């Protein structure tokens, strides 16, 4: 029997690497997207795929590689993300920094879905790694570029879920919680394992008919 195939973006370190490692351990065929494969520490059992999600040509080249090597994809985990404004105030926000943040955190997942949805069949899943910072119902006052990019990613998630409903492809957003990674920092209360669990629930456990939602630890989050 062929194993399911998952592509995890931003798998060089942090949550993406942990999700890729766990899926490979579970027997999945895992494509670990990395924008700089040469700098990535070895991750046994995964196939490293050069992929910069802020670069449309790189996305298209990766989709062509997956098409020719595997012919299809079951799960796309849009995990790659950046937080360029560590704190800051929206009134002083540099919109050039906002553009760069949106290119990776929002346009990246959208372009990935556009490129890879054609390789996915009924039962496929797209998991967008978002953040509680993107919630409109809980206004954030920190890292405005990052939070705005995740709010927009949530909107992209709802749009994609509607667009792919007829093809039976589920699209959801997930918050891993505040996790100790390079992005989350050492003060974060959650371990890598806890954060990855929240993401993996959507890959491995969620009802395949659940689509267009925002989740943390398997429970719905308000937008
Ligand atoms: N940690 C938290 O507390 C937390 C909370 C909520 C949501 N999240 C989300 O979880 C996801 C993973 O975050 P993390 O905490 O694991 O961050 P991290 O440790 O900083 O890792 C970020 C990953 O994204 C990759 N990346 C960045 N820009 C990329 C690009 N243009 N193309 C491809 N890969 C790119 C990085 O690759 P390089 O090694 O090449 O830089 C790295 O592999 C992000 O979407 C983040 O917003 C994290």
Image (cartoon, rainbow, N blue to C red):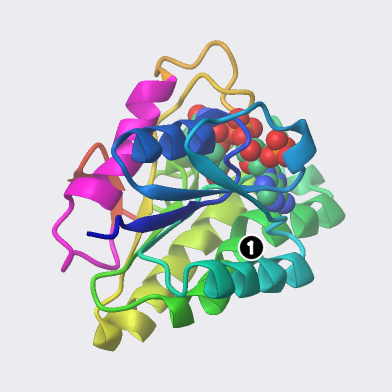
Q: Is residue 203 magenta?
A: yes
Q: Position of residue 165 (x, y in %)?
A: 27, 82
Q: In front: 152, or 144? A: 152
Disc 1 target residue: 108
Question: What residue occupies the far front of the structure in this picture?
Answer: 1
Please determine whether, in this image, residue 73 is positioned above or below residue 46: below
Which residue is drawn at the image coordinates 70% and 32% (left, top)?
Answer: 40
Please determine whether, in this image, residue 60 is positioned above or below residue 85: below
Label 1's element? helix
Which residue is drawn at the image coordinates 29% and 37% (left, top)?
Answer: 26
Q: Which residues are magenta?
A: 192-213
Q: Quadrant of the N terminus?
A: bottom left
Check mark 1 vs ligand 1: CB closer than 8 Å? yes or no.
Answer: yes
Q: Examine the residues drawn in magenta and state their main secondary structure.
A: helix
Q: Quadrant of residue 160?
A: bottom left
Q: Horizontally, is 71 left or right of 9 in the view? A: left
Q: In front: 105, or 127? A: 127
Q: Is residue 116 magenta?
A: no
Q: Quadrant of the C terminus?
A: bottom left
Q: Position of residue 75 (x, y in %)?
A: 38, 60
Please determine whether, in this image, residue 18 is positioned above or below residue 160: above
Q: Horizontally, is 34 left or right of 128 in the view? A: right
Can residue 145 be seen from the camera position used here? no
Which residue is drawn at the image coordinates 68% and 58% (left, top)?
Answer: 53
Q: In front: 215, or 192? A: 192
Q: Quadrant of residue 109?
A: bottom right
Which residue is drawn at the image coordinates 60% and 30% (left, top)?
Answer: 13
């Amino acid at each position: 029997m062929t194993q399911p195939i998952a592509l995890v973006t931003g798998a060089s370190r942090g949550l993406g690497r942990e999700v890729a490692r766990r899926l490979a351990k579970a027997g999945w065929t895992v494509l670990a997207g990395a924008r700089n494969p040469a700098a990535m520490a070895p991750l046994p059992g995964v196939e490293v795929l050069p992929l910069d999600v802020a670069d449309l040509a790189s996305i298209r080249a990766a989709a062509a590689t997956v098409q020719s090597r595997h012919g299809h994809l079951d799960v796309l985990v849009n995990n790659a993300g950046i937080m360029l404004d560590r704190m800051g105030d929206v009134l002083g926000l540099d919109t050039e920094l906002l553009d760069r943040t949106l290119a990776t955190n929002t346009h990246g997942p959208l372009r990935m879905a556009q490129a890879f949805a054609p390789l996915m069949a009924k039962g496929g899943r797209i998991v967008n790694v978002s953040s509680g910072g993107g919630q409109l119902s809980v206004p954030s006052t920190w890292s405005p570029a990052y939070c705005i990019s995740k709010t927009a990613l949530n909107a992209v998630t709802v749009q994609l879920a509607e667009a792919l409903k007829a093809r039976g492809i589920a699209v959801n957003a997930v918050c891993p919680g505040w996790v100790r990674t390079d992005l989350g920092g050492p003060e974060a209360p959650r371990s890598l394992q806890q954060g990855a669990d929240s993401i993996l629930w959507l890959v491995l456990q969620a009802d395949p008919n659940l689509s267009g939602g925002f989740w943390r630890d398997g429970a719905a989050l308000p937008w």
